């Protein structure tokens, strides 16, 4: 099965797991690597490789270990590219940025001294 943009939206999670497992298996075979060798490089059990290749799922950590061992970390960037900010969102973000920050007055919360209590200091 090959995923394309037209049928991925209607595929179940299980079908996508099977497709991903198949792609991992094909990548392993393209690298002329056995399941045991991939398991050793990824730090997982050989049974885990068999399970993943048959679409039985795995943890995210295991998936990353497998992708790293297959030298295919670029897949992750293709899978979840860095989100881009649209020009309009960037413009709105700039408009929301304050140009001045109000400072809180130091006497906030304390009563001010009465005008009669204040003296220049040269008065006797």
Image (cartoon, rainbow, N blue to C red):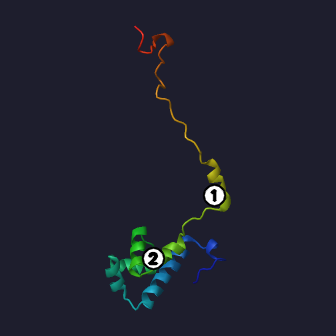
Residue 40 x, y percent position in the rendering = 31, 81
Q: Can residue 59 be seen in this view?
A: no
Q: Name which residue lies at 55% across and 37% down.
A: 102
Q: Residue furthest top?
A: 124
* Measured Cα–Cα span from mark 1 to mark 2: 30 Å
**First of labels 1, 2 by sequence position:** 2
Q: Name the residue nearer the viewer: 68 or 20.
A: 68
Q: Name which residue lies at 51% across and 75% down.
A: 17
Q: Which residue lies furthest to the front in this view?
A: 122
Circle 2: element type? loop
Total tally of numbered discs in the picture: 2
Q: Name the residue nearer the viewer: 120 or 64.
A: 120
Give the image quarter of residue 39. Answer: bottom left
Circle 1: element type? helix
Q: Nearer the viewer, mark 1 or mark 2?
A: 1
Residue 42 x, y percent position in the rendering = 35, 77
Give the image quarter of residue 72. Answer: bottom left
Q: Name which residue lies at 38% across and 80% down.
A: 69
Residue 63 x, y percent position in the rendering = 42, 73
Compared with 41, 113 (above or below) is above
Query: Which label number is shown at residue 90?
Result: 1
Q: Residues within 10 Å of mark 2 (few under 14, many from 20)?
A: some
Task: Return the residue at label 2.
Answer: 73
Compared with 3, 13 (above or below) is above
């Amino acid at each position: 099965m090959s995923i394309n943009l037209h049928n991925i939206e209607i595929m179940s999670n299980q079908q996508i797991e099977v497709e991903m497992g198949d792609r991992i298996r094909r990548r392993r075979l393209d690298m002329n690597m056995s399941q045991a060798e991939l398991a050793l490089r990824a730090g997982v059990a050989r049974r885990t490789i068999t399970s993943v290749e048959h679409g039985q799922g795995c943890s995210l950590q295991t998936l990353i270990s497998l992708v790293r061992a297959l030298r295919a970390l670029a897949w992750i960037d293709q899978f979840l590219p860095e989100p881009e900010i649209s020009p309009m969102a960037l413009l709105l973000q700039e408009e929301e940025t304050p140009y001045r920050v109000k400072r809180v007055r130091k006497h906030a919360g304390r009563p001010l001294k009465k005008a009669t209590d204040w003296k220049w200091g040269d008065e006797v």
